[in-house]
Image (cartoon, rainbow, N blue to C red):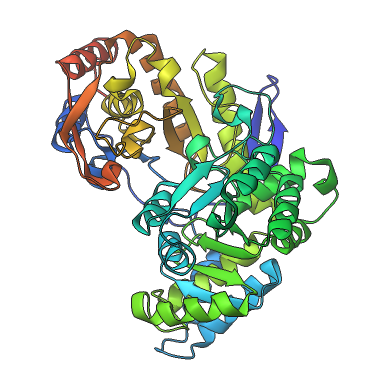
Amino acid sequence: MSKIRLQNGEELPLEMHKVKIVQKLELKSVDQRLRAIEEAGNNTFLLKNRDVFLDMLTDSGVNAMSNLQQAAMLTADDCYAGSESFYRLEAELKKVFKKKYFLPAHQGRACEHLLSRVLVKEGDIIPMNYHFTTTKAHIRLRGGDILEIPVDEALKPESDCLFKGNIDIVKLKKAFEEFGKRIPFVRLEAGTNLIGGQPISIQNIKETHALCKKYGVPLMLDTSLLQDNLYFMKMREESCKDKAIIDICNEVAANVDIIYFSARKFGCAKGGGMCLDDDRIFEQLRELVPLFEGFLTYGGMSDKEMEAIAVGIREVSDFDVISQGPQFIKYMVEELRKEGVPVVTPPGGLGCHVDAKAFLSHLKDEDFQAASLSSALYIVSGIRGMERGTMAEERNPDGTECYAAIELLRLALPRRVFTMSQIKYAIDRITWLYKNRELVGGLRWKEEPRILRFFFGKLEPVDDWQKKLAEKFKKDFPYGF
């Protein structure tokens, strides 16, 4: 990824690729969008893709494949057991992670399911830099619980801290002293999804690993967002600036004991897996893979996907490949900041994160600020973002609402998918909405599932604010788009 300066002084990230396959998009009218979000219960997960203009819901499984990945899919060795496609993927993973064993799974949460079955028991406490929704759910289903101990800067939307994904080492020491053998492992996320895709430093990983070794527990790393994190390590960490990306990746892997990943993000194809050295844990996991995922040489993935992932893993070593996402995100964040829009800083990976609590400061916690903002942005733009706040939490044991520590609207930028004009369109509509933010009202539960409610729960507006927002939009944009 290169950065150029135009004659007028403007700096733009420059795509180091050309587009050869496209998918047609349609921008529905504001009235059509209003009907669509009502039918979806104000949950962007329940929108039909045909009603979405720019899909910024997630980067999971929707990143653009390279021509080399697509070509590799034609070489797939389609068979149930012993596929050469599996062994090619295994070889690539051993180059980047240097681990003895690789076990496949159909995606990252499948890895979390199996790892929790093997390692988590009733009463266990798992310290981590920050949770992910499915991670917490699987641990709690096993009777365990999580202990989030990120550095204090992590939950400050605006900050100068370059590694807000770091775990607090002092708090981790206290956790070991307090919980002792109730801690079966420590989990880190390289690129903390729920607090803005914020990276973890390699120094923090090393310090965490040293502490885990002292207390005799394994360190687990979710590397789903590792490629963005590798970019930030190279750009922000002094010890990494002169190292090749593959060497940084090897160093990260050398300082953790168990690695798991969603290839929907890390590898840009649909799959996942676990890499480790421990014989005992491997043998326990190996018994579960055929039971829940598939045979040991496909684990729920197609052979074609495994071929694509193998190439995608190799491409992670290419700085031009891994830098586009962070640079596009940085551009979007900085342009929104110029307009006064509250966003998470410093810019992280995965996407641009809008601080919904500050954006809609006139709303209360019980109004579901992030969900309201997600709904409002879709109405005025056709952009599908994701609520990353209270809706993504679970209720407390006594039935009361568990309000999120941070309320974000995540606007994911899948790798090599969007053009600069589409990014500028998003910036324009977000800015318009910010200027008219007083029109946005709250939401309340209409249908509330017990587990992972953000996937298929439904909300309704507390009054007719959505219709008023649509009318104001039509006044300012008479053509209705």
On the question of residue 220 being in view, the answer is yes
Q: Residue at x 52, y 76 (%)?
A: 103
Quadrant location of the C terminus in the rendered image: top left
The residue closer to the viewer here, 343 or 448, is: 448
Figure quadrant of residue 364: top left
Quadrant location of the N terminus in the rendered image: top right
Figure quadrant of residue 99: bottom right
The residue closer to the viewer here, 380 or 236, is: 236
Is residue 92 shown left or right of residue 262? right
* Residue 298 position within the rendered picture, expressed as x and y whole percent measured from the top left: 44, 80
* Residue 204 position within the rendered picture, expressed as x and y whole percent measured from the top left: 72, 45
* Residue 97 position within the rendered picture, expressed as x and y whole percent measured from the top left: 67, 67
Q: Residue at x 79, y 56 (%)?
A: 244
Is residue 334 shown left or right of residue 21? right
The residue closer to the viewer here, 98 or 341, is: 98
* Residue 446 position within the rendered picture, expressed as x and y whole percent measured from the top left: 14, 33
Figure quadrant of residue 58: top left
**Image vertical order of residue 409 relative to residue 74, above or below:** above
**Image vertical order of residue 336 relative to residue 40, above or below:** above
On the question of residue 17 being in view, the answer is no
Q: Residue at x 42, y 67 (%)?
A: 117
